[in-house]
Image (cartoon, grey):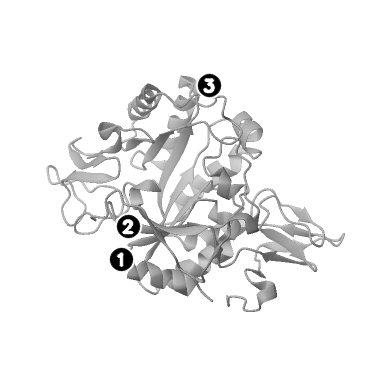
Amino acid sequence: MDLPTSDDSRGVAPARWWHALADGRVQCDLCPRLCHLGDGQRGFCYIRQNRGGAMVLTSYGRASGFCVDPIEKKPLNHFYPGTAVLSFGTAGCNLGCRFCQNWDISKARENDRLMDFAGPEAIAEAAVEAECRSVAFTYNDPVIFAEYAIDTAAACRRRGIKTVGVTAGYITPEARGEFFAATDAVNVDLKAFTERFYHKLCFAHLGPVLDTLAYLKRETDVWVEVTTLIIPGQNDSREELDRLCAWFVENMGPETPLHFSAFHPDFKMTDIEPTPPATLSRAREQALAHGLKHVYTGNVHDVGGQSTYCAGCGELVIERDWYRLGRYDLDAHGRCVACGHRLAGHFDAGPGSWGPRRRRLLIAEP
């Protein structure tokens, strides 16, 4: 897709996944909301709009910022550990999570935060120059800027750069094939394991997310890791976590990584205390008891819960202290040096050395 060039249309590009309705409106077919929009109206995500009877994306090439991060921050622990990833997002979101930890971006109106302008080729070139192993579509959900993400992924792949999506997985079957074909790895936020939680706190539904996860595992080669933000009193009961883990083992397999992250009060849920580290440890123990092999704790300092252990013999193979790697006992083929079991994931001959650094990039185009 060619980037629009006129000043009046900067950031506006034709959208995919929509159709006209008999009453003159258009229906967005990108996410399960299926927004019906009259001329000039915007979808729930805000950045998809009906203009003159056609759907457009209004944030193509417009980003809320570019940063080089450790890949473990996505979080992805089994996708080229220790390497740098160029991360960016746009504005808006197709979920309405009351606890959003990136609300200043995901809830922003487009002109509030979209200050950087860069097309797919410029982003790919910046990733090469910054010696990044991958580019991540993150901060807000890349599903809503799928056209921009897909074109950026194509530019990156031409230069040997991998692509990563950090998403809630709220996407229709019609759109998910093309979207996920553009990504090499994803971390999917599984917000909770009850419809009540999704409906009340996210203004969404659980079913489409589970469908996306099952699709990714059964029908694609995309590397998948999953994160659940544990919120005290909302999705942290033993019973709910047992059901989540049982579903996870059956549908995602025991070697798919699952991350339990700590909540901190934010956005419209400032009346709930931060997640106690003991709750994360208990959730991790439950998941391990269900047979999961790679279960991680996040947003807390927990070397044991952030490190990777061999699914074959249980030996420590990747030691992590926050985003800094220590002991690394995998051979050049990603196999445990103690027993030869191949660790699930994608690995280079050795670990990266980016560490915990975070560097802001300016990728400005005229």
Q: Considering the numbered disc 1 on the image, is that residue within a helix, a strand or a loop?
A: loop
First in sequence: mark 3 vs mark 1: 1
* Quadrant in which the C terminus appears: bottom right
Left or right, 234 with reference to 262? right
Can you identify the residue that label 3 sits on? 233
The N terminus appears in which quarter of the rendering?
Answer: bottom right
Q: Residue at x 21, y 39 (%)?
A: 312
Q: Is residue 363 left or right of residue 304?
A: right
Mark 2 touching mark 1, by CB under 8 A? yes
Residue 308 screen position, x and y as percent: 26, 40
Dot 3 falls on a residue whose secondary structure is loop
| Tag in front: 2 or 3 | 2
* Pick the front one: 197 or 362: 362
Earlier in the chain: of badge 2 and badge 1, it is: 2
Residue 156 visible in the shown view:
no
Pointer 2 residue: 84
